[in-house]
Image: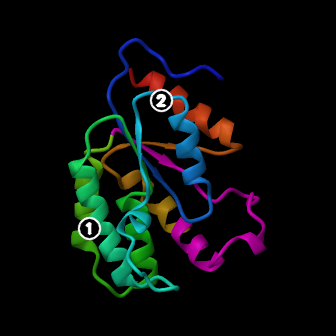
Amino acid sequence: MNKVYNKSNPRPMRIAITGAHNVGKTTLAEALLEHLPGYTLEIEPYHQLRTDFAEVPTAEDFLEQFNYSVDLIYGSGDNVIFDRCVVDILAYLHVIDPQRNIEALFEKMQAVMGEVDLVVFVPVEQPDIMSAGQVELPRLRGQVDDLLHDWINDLNAKVIEVSGSVSNRRDQVLARLLLSL
């Protein structure tokens, strides 16, 4: 599927790409942009905030990113791809601070995700395409991935789980978008 997504009148959409770190979310988002004329990319809140977060992220760092992501989604227009969203940010927060009551945040996440037309879940693949030496904080990555697998079906949005090469993942998303017309 090497064609540009060029249906004469594609439905405007908000697409959120979610997954743990080092799974290829940004690479996939950039590949999708090449095939979705008129779409913009919202880079992950961590980079947009440009705050001096701790070297090892804290729960408060993720809470700030969560709130920023909520505002980003509610304030966005259509034809946007979000590289990281409230789902994985909340998963990081919960893994880092499992004693924190996240019930209200989880409900807020579900409400916000109702504004997203398609969630693209990029899981850690088995076998992992990243070698152990390439991944920072591998235990955290695995825990977040496990939690995302648990939560992904509780979202208030359509979800597609992608796998394979970047081009395979891109084509899976584009095919799903064509079904949404």
Categorize mark 2 by other alpha carbons within 10 Å: few (<14), some (14-19), many (20+).
Answer: some
Q: Is residue 27 magenta?
A: no
Q: Can residue 144 be found in the magenta stretch?
A: yes
Does residue 50 appear in this view? yes
The residue that disc 2 covers is 36
Residue 72: where, in percent of width, then height?
28, 55
Q: Quadrant of residue 179?
A: top left
* Quarter of the image where the N terminus is located: top right
Residue toward you, 31 or 88? 31
Q: Nearer the viewer, residue 114 or 133?
A: 133
Q: Position of residue 76 (x, y in %)?
A: 26, 45
Horizontal relation, residue 103 to residue 98: left or right: left
Residue span colored magenta? 117-145
State the CA–CA distance, disc 2 to disc 1: 28 Å
Q: Which residue is mark 1?
A: 67
Disc 1 residue type?
Asn
The amino acid on which the numbered mark 2 sits, given as a three-letter code, is Leu
**Who's the residue at 37% across and 69% down the image?**
90
SS at circle 1: helix
Tell me the quadrant of the picture where the C terminus can be found.
top left
Q: How many residues crowd around disc 1 within 10 Å: few (fewer than 14), some, or many (20 or more)?
A: some
Q: Position of residue 35 (x, y in %)?
A: 54, 29
**Up/down of 1 relative to 25, above or below:** above
